[in-house]
Structure formats: C-alpha cells, structure tokens
Amino acid sequence: NFEVNALMGPGVDPHTYKSKTSEMKTMMNADAIVYNGIHFEANLIDAITEISKNGFVISLGDIVPEKRLRKTIEFGSAYDPHFWHDVNLFATSIELAGQQFSMKFPESKSYIDSATNSYTKSLYKLENNVQTEIAKIPDSSRVLITAHDAFGYYGRAFGIQVKGVQGISTASDISIRGITELTDFIVSRKIPSIFVENSVSQKNIKSVMEGCKAKGLKLKIGGTLYSDGLGDPLSGAETYIKMIKKNTSTIVSALSK
C-alpha cells in the first residue's frame, strides 16, 4: 500500500503557490513525487528538479504524447498545462505513470497494475458520460466563458468553444480592450451565462457582466467551476471524477436553459 499526501489543498492556486519549509522536507523524504508539470507548479520547479536528480519523480504532463498537448504562446512553457480537463488524455497519463510505478516498485507490480487498470476504466466511462451530457446543450449556446483560460482541453475534447477572461495563467493581466472584445462577443451570441472559478478572483468576471449589462444583456453567473484544483469534502468535487462530473453538470444546466 502507498500512503498519499497532497501538497496543495482545495481552493489553492497552483500557478502562484509557494511551499513551506516543512513541505519541502516531506517532498525530499517521499518515495515518489507525482506532479502535473508543464510549468503548472511554477514556484516548485527548481525544488522538484533538484529532487528528481536522485529521487523518483513523475510529471504527468511531460509523459503524455507531446502532440496531444495544446500549444500556447502566453505561458511559461510552450504548452497549456491544464491537460487533465481532457479526460482521455488524463487517463493516458495515469496508464503511463502506472507503468513507471510498476518498474520502480516491482514487488507491488500486481497491485499497481490492477489499480491502474481499474481507475482508467472508470475514466473512460466518465469520458462517455461527459460527451452525452454536453450534447444536451444547444449548438448556439455551446460557449464556455470562464475567469481564466483553463478549459481549452475540455472544450477541444467535448466540442465546446471556450473563452477565458484572463489568459492561461492566473498571474496574467486583462486589458480594457480584452474585456470590451469579450462583452461584444457575448452580446452578439446572446450567451446566457458566465462561470466563476474556485481559485480565481471574480473581479474581472464582474467587469464583463457590467459591460454586458450596459449593452442590454443580463449575463448570469452559471455557477462555480473547479479549474486548477479540487473542491473541499463538502463541495461534491473532492475527487478528480467528481470534479469533472460537477463541472459538467454546472455547465450543462447553465447553458441548456
């Protein structure tokens, strides 16, 4: 059996997260470290690189096929790091990580292989479930507008156009021109709802809503989406599968009206 410790709790923004000394000790003493990668945990990169010289470290985003990653010009890497919102791609990363764990811990190979197989099966089932749900949204309303551009993989995988008020990193700024262009787009498409995120400030969302109101469109908040992390135990989004399901039901119920 493996004891699992999560470094970042619910509602933490990994883009801007800084670790405490005690957490660094935990990482240095770990038998294995699994992290997202693709520059997502920007402030931990130096520490993780150092530990990886002698330790067993897996970056999920860096073991999946590069051709399946979304290119971007506005992040600290050449790719968008939010790849887990594409359930199929996340399942691929789990399968590949499982293979590496089996090689590293051969005495636990049968347990690791069985757990990997069981979990990825449930992920492929989840993928089908999301496709069925998204199909309920009318074509004209199939536009997801969120606080920052974290849902590009989700949109690509499930056929929904995505626009973020901010860029891919929550540390990026938004211009007045950017807000004006976005409000024009929302009004022209008569999009009913915009979504807030559990780890991102709502300030920019409010600016967009005010801009739409001034142009005669009452834009509603469609609910909270979990973009950069899971929810707390009471959120119904405290595991990966529950988080994807919760995001999907929030999106579908807000855009199907």
Image (spheres, rainbow, N blue to C red):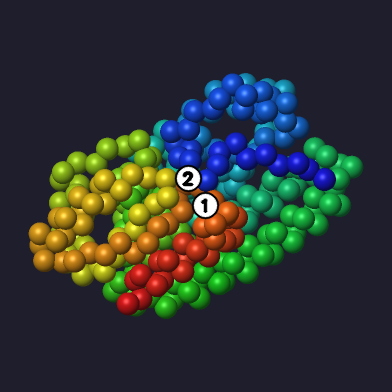
Please name the residue shown 16% across and 55% down the image.
210
Q: Position of residue 65 (x, y in %)?
A: 58, 48
Tell me if I can see residue 242 in this picture: yes
Residue that protrudes farthest toward the right in the picture: 107
Q: Decide: marks 1, 2 in contact (CB < 8 A)?
A: yes
Q: Position of residue 3 (x, y in %)?
A: 76, 41
Question: In the figure, 89 relative to 255: above or below?
Answer: above
Please name the residue shown 68% across and 48% down the image.
96
Question: In the figure, 9 relative to 210: above or below?
Answer: above
Which dot marks residue 213?
A: none
189 vs 142, left or right, is: left
Pointer 1 or 2: first along the chain? 2
What is the secondary structure assignment of the residue under circle 2? loop
Q: Position of residue 87 (x, y in %)?
A: 56, 59
Please name the residue shown 63% across and 40% down the image.
6
What is the secondary structure assignment of the residue under circle 1? loop
Residue type at tag 1: Gly
Which dot marks residue 11?
A: 2
Please name the residue shown 42% across and 50% down the image.
198
Which dot marks residue 231?
A: 1
